[in-house]
Amino acid sequence: MALMDIVQQHLGQSEVTQISQQLGVSPSVAQTAIAAAIPMIMGGMARHAAQPQGAQSVQQAITAHDGVTDDVGSVLQAGPPADVSGTSGGLLGRILGTHRDAVQENVQQASGLDAEKTKKLLMMLSPVVLGVLARHQFGGQTAQQANPGQLSSVLHQEAQSAAQQAPHVGGLLGKILGAAGA
């Protein structure tokens, strides 16, 4: 099963309703935004993890968010973890690197949310994506044990698969995956 499908499984109707209430949008708008954001987060992480230092940063974030998927509703209700934002970009900066702005802009374009709501959505979903990655097996190893090449490869494959399955975000996601730099 694809990582994005597993993330979506952790975001049932009650979680989507929580997200919609926190964003001040309808549940259908929230669901559309979530469907656009998850592949973009994966694509941004894949692009960042293509560089050894980026992969190490993503692995550290995965380790720090192990267990998040045990109770996604409580995580959403509590709001983004303290490490999500900050002057250095916080969690989003660590997992997306220099692609953070591109991810945010593309999610905004695909979802129709304004910039502030898009950033808030990314901050809510990132820990959930990392929690799923923490439980995923990479060739018989957890993400924390996988080598940077394995992590980068799996993330890139997942993002490419999402681009093919979701035409409304595929072109935007392709821009992130093909972006220059780390």
Image: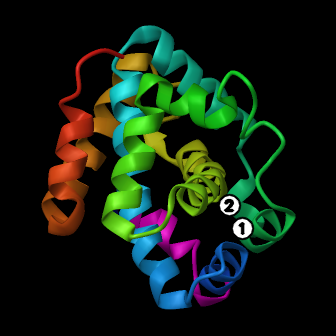
Instruction: Estimate the x, y position of residue 112 in percent, counting from the top left.
Output: 39, 70
Callouts 1 and 2 close, C-beta under 8 Å: yes
The numbered mark at residue 69 is 2
Cα distance, mark 1 to mark 2?
A: 5 Å
Seen at 37% across and 38% down, the residue is: 102
- Taking the image as shown, residue 4 lies to the left or right of residue 159, namely right
**Residue drawn at (65%, 73%) of the image:** 23
What residue is drawn where x is 57% and y is 75%? 11
Q: Residues within 10 Å of mark 2 (few under 14, many from 20)?
A: many
Judging by the rendered image, the residue that carries numbered circle 1 is: 72
Whether residue 113 is in magenta: the answer is no
Whether residue 3 is visible: no
Q: Identity of the amino acid at label 2?
A: Thr
Tag shown at residue 18: none
The residue at the point 53 percent across, 58 percent down is 118
Give the x, y percent position of residue 123: 64, 51
Quadrant containing the N terminus is bottom left
Q: Secondary structure at mark 1?
A: helix
Q: Amino acid at mark 1?
A: Val
